[in-house]
Image (cartoon, grey):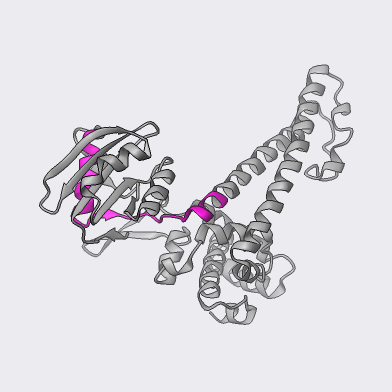
Amino acid sequence: MRFYNGSHTYFCGIDLHARNMYTCVLDQEGRVLLHRDLPTDPDVFLKAIAPFRENLAVAVECIFTWYWLADLCAREGIDFVLGHALYMKAIHGGKAKNDRIDSLKIATLLRGGMLPQAYVYPPETCSTRDLLRRRLTLVRQRGQLLAHIQNTHHPYNLPTPKARINYRCNREGIAEKFSDPSVFESISSDVELAGHYDFLIKDLELFLTRKANVHDPENFYRLRSIPGVGKILAITILYEIHDIARFQRVQNFASYARLVQCEKSSSGERLGTGGGKIGNVHLKWAFSEAAVLFLRANPPAQQYIEALRKKHGKAKSISILAHKLGRAVYYMMKNKKPFSLEAFRMS
């Protein structure tokens, strides 16, 4: 957990919503100088904080509406702090809770150096990262359509397609196997929609690959030097990390990527693990996928995982491999070197 402890003359806490923003400004002594509800209008906000612009810090909780405010503060030269939503227990644990109270609590946490920080992605990469996540949603929706096509064969005791229907050419004639008109229409709709998803996803992947080649071509190709890591996994890892320098240690990176379990203990007694939802779920997915693909046509990796499987079991051995790949990526990007299987085996 990182706390913001910058020194400022004024501290602004905002409880941000889609159409309004309850704004609270404190001075160094904790006196309330501004405390009112404002519309989410840049001009209105800048006019309200104009008397306190000199050495001002603005803080807001990390929800889906913060992009425009971060960009505005960056353009105006105002320090912007993004609060980590899952760590801000002082807001969610109060006896009373409303927008006025929340904005005061955010400003107070900021002033006291106790506001847990989340990472603020720069606008030039933030939108591409969101597009990459949207692509994953489309892939999953396409997978649901294909699964429905596959599973519909079982109630009617029909043989399932022998060829993989994730390829467009293997879906021809599938709907005609069903004699019932309603089932025929259902499967035809699935096939038609899956075809549209094919084209959409292909176009998105081409666009994202071009963006990665422009944004950070060196790290993009370094990541693709890992056996089994293709363009999409490399782009996912690249944009979800953005800047490896923001992680001081490899342990911080492994925790952020959800590759380790955090222990809870008190008075020398282990109480279990926690924090399973804190971190980047997309990096967790990417490294889990990379661990499985890393084993394909890779005899040294297969020997390594077999030794782990005998000691820890199948599931945990894959998790250990994903963790090891995460550490490898950290040092690859930090030291600007491609993947080395020999170094990976020795680490």
| Relative vertical location of residue 25 with respect to residue 247 in this rendering, above or below | above
Check residue 101 for magenta coloring. Answer: yes
- Regarding residue 290, the answer to whether it shows in the image is no
Q: Is residue 68 left or right of residue 184?
A: left
Check residue 162 for magenta coloring. Answer: no
Q: Nearer the viewer, residue 49 or 182?
A: 49
The image position of residue 128, as x and y in percent, is 57, 51
Q: Nearer the viewer, residue 48 or 88?
A: 48
Q: Is residue 100 left or right of residue 282?
A: left
Q: Quadrant of the N terminus?
A: bottom left
The image position of residue 48, as x and y in percent, is 25, 40
Q: Residue at x 75, y 36 (%)?
A: 196
Q: Residue at x 71, y 37 (%)?
A: 147
| Relative vertical location of residue 142 with respect to residue 247 in this rendering, above or below | above
State the image quarter where residue 37 is shown: top left
Q: Is residue 164 left or right of residue 276?
A: right
The image position of residue 140, as x and y in percent, is 64, 41
Residue at the extreme top: 181
State the image quarter where residue 328 is shown: bottom right
The image position of residue 308, as x and y in percent, is 57, 69
Q: Is residue 165 left or right of residue 303?
A: right
Q: Residue at x 52, y 55 (%)?
A: 124
State the image quarter where residue 32 is shown: top left
- Regarding residue 244, the answer to whether it shows in the image is yes
Q: Nearer the viewer, residue 172 or 333?
A: 333
Question: Magenta part of the protein: which range?
Answer: 100-128
Q: Main secondary structure of the magenta part?
A: helix
